[in-house]
Image: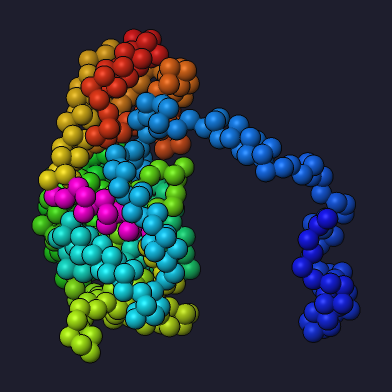
């Protein structure tokens, strides 16, 4: 028997309150061609046992990183996650915690957010961080809006080596508010500094770069710093891989004003593409213009350490055109996973992860370069854990052949302009055998 929450008399009362005589009158604005004319043809209802079997059957069709030797990357990476991370964030006091509006009953949540902010500041070298953002793309877009609020300029210069999905989100965020977007083309897999130098002027609010960039290459950040900060008001926004910061220069060292990025690599599983979380940090003088929420530490009336949402009132985020941002929440559980992960790994652990990624990626690139018909797309540019190779046949055919061997060789670059390029990501999880097996399979699949 179907469960219907309202009776006929209750529905009539609702229609009367709305001011219409019937349901048909209520939906008369919907065109006839869009209305359902007959009952939906649904499959017969299944028992719990039957639906469980069906879901398991469909789930088994997925190719996951546990069952395949995957070299996919392009923004989401298969790093090792200690079992303690899942165990801790699954505790009910964390998993079911609601957003901390009432500080007096949310001290646990506020404390771990405060610890998260502190760790992001230590990782990036910046002075203040917020409680996290929805993902790396929205964090980057919000950084642009913050730069515009800071210096009251509207021109934004974007490196063409930014992740294409980031660029789409930026265009969406800035559409209709008078922001001029200037895209700097890539040259040999990195930003063309000559074009960048000509594009940046006294009307530029910010320059946005990504390092490692979409292709995995490291940008010339110190040269970019010189170009950007020749102009007094121009801000440098750096989108970074948090794992890379364990062995490369912190953004503060090349004078980044705002630092953002995708935090998934910090203790969060791939989860078929989400949920994710973005991190956001900046200089202290921009704290009041920072989007999202910030947790601060203080003392209570008894002199004990206490935590509270600070600098911004939640209500400001619903003041429409006067709001700092329409983001008034954060990805708390994902940020907690990152906090636990960084706590467990420590500085030495993060350095080990980053070092292994670096050396294993370079080992694989070197072995692939020995194969005839395959070559590095950007042989003279330094990279971290991801790189692009040129292939003698379409990358889609290589992927198809290697999937039969349980190997996902990387990202087909057809959607990004070249059907004979493959982007390969390597993390610390790959053993030398995994890498050698990939090289052997690639040699056979590429007919070289």
| Image spot of residue 75 (x, y percent) | 35, 44
Q: Quadrant of residue 407?
A: top left
| Image vertical order of residue 154 relative to residue 288, above or below | above
Is 360 magenta? The answer is no
> How many discs mark residues in the rendered view?
0
| Image vertical order of residue 219 relative to residue 445, above or below | below
The residue segment tinted magenta is 333-347
Per the picture, the main secondary structure of the magenta-coloured stretch is helix
Residue at the image point whose x is 42% and y is 66% from the top = 97
Extreme-bottom residue of the structure: 301
| Image spot of residue 412 (x, y percent) | 42, 30
Residue at the image point whose x is 21% and y is 69% from the top = 128
Q: Quadrant of residue 237?
A: bottom left
| Image vertical order of residue 96 relative to residue 403, above or below | below
Q: Quadrant of residue 374?
A: top left
Residue 225 in sight here? no
In the drawing, does residue 401 fall left or right of residue 388? right
| Image vertical order of residue 432 relative to residue 340, above or below | above
| Image spot of residue 37 (x, y percent) | 87, 54
In the drawing, does residue 81 fall left or right of residue 255? right
Q: Toward the viewer: 339 or 357? A: 339
Where does the C terminus fall, quadrant-wise?
top left
Q: Toward the viewer: 47 or 356? A: 47
| Image spot of residue 332 (x, y percent) | 37, 62
Where does the N terminus fall, quadrant-wise?
bottom right
Q: Toward the viewer: 185 or 121? A: 121
Residue at the image point whose x is 38% and y is 57% from the top = 91
Residue at the image point whose x is 28% and y is 65% from the top = 112
């Amino acid at each position: 028997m179907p469960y219907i929450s309202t009776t006929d008399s209750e529905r009539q009362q609702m229609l009367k309150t709305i001011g219409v005589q019937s349901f048909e009158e209520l939906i008369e604005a919907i065109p006839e061609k869009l209305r359902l004319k007959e009952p939906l043809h649904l499959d017969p209802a299944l028992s719990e046992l039957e639906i469980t079997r069906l879901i398991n059957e469909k789930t088994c069709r997925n190719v996951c990183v546990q069952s395949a030797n995957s070299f996919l990357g392009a923004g989401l990476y298969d790093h090792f996650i200690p079992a303690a991370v899942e165990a801790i964030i699954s505790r009910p006091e964390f998993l079911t915690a609601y957003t901390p509006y009432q500080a007096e009953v949310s001290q646990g949540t506020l404390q771990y957010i405060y610890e998260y902010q502190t760790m992001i500041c230590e990782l990036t070298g910046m002075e203040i961080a917020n409680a996290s953002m929805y993902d790396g793309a929205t964090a980057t877009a919000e950084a642009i809006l913050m730069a515009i609020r800071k210096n009251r300029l509207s021109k934004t210069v974007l490196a063409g080596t930014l992740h294409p999905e980031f660029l789409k989100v930026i265009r969406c965020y800035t559409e209709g508010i008078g922001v001029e977007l200037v895209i700097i083309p890539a040259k040999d897999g990195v930003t063309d500094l000559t074009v960048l130098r000509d594009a940046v002027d006294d009307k530029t609010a910010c320059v946005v770069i990504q390092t490692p960039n979409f292709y995995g290459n490291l940008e010339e950040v110190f040269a970019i710093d010189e170009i950007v900060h020749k102009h007094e008001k121009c801000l440098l926004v750096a989108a970074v891989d948090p794992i890379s910061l364990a062995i490369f220069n912190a953004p503060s060292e090349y004078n980044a004003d705002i630092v953002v990025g995708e935090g998934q690599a910090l203790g969060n599983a791939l989860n078929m593409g989400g949920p994710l979380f973005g991190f956001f940090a900046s200089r202290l003088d921009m704290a009041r213009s920072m989007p999202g929420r910030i947790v601060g530490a203080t003392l209570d009336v008894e002199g004990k350490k206490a935590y509270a949402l600070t600098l911004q009132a939640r209500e400001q985020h619903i003041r429409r055109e006067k709001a700092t941002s329409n983001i008034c929440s954060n990805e708390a559980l994902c940020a907690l996973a990152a906090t636990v992960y960084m706590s467990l790994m420590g500085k030495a652990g993060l350095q080990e992860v980053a070092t292994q990624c670096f050396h294993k990626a370079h080992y694989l690139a070197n072995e692939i370069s020995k194969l005839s018909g395959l070559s590095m797309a950007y042989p003279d540019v330094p990279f971290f854990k991801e790189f692009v190779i040129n292939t003698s046949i379409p990358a889609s055919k290589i992927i198809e052949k290697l999937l039969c061997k349980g190997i996902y060789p990387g990202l087909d670059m057809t959607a990004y302009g070249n059907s004979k390029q493959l982007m390969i990501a390597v993390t610390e999880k790959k053993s030398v055998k995994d890498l050698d097996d990939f090289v052997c399979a690639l040699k056979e699949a590429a007919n070289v």
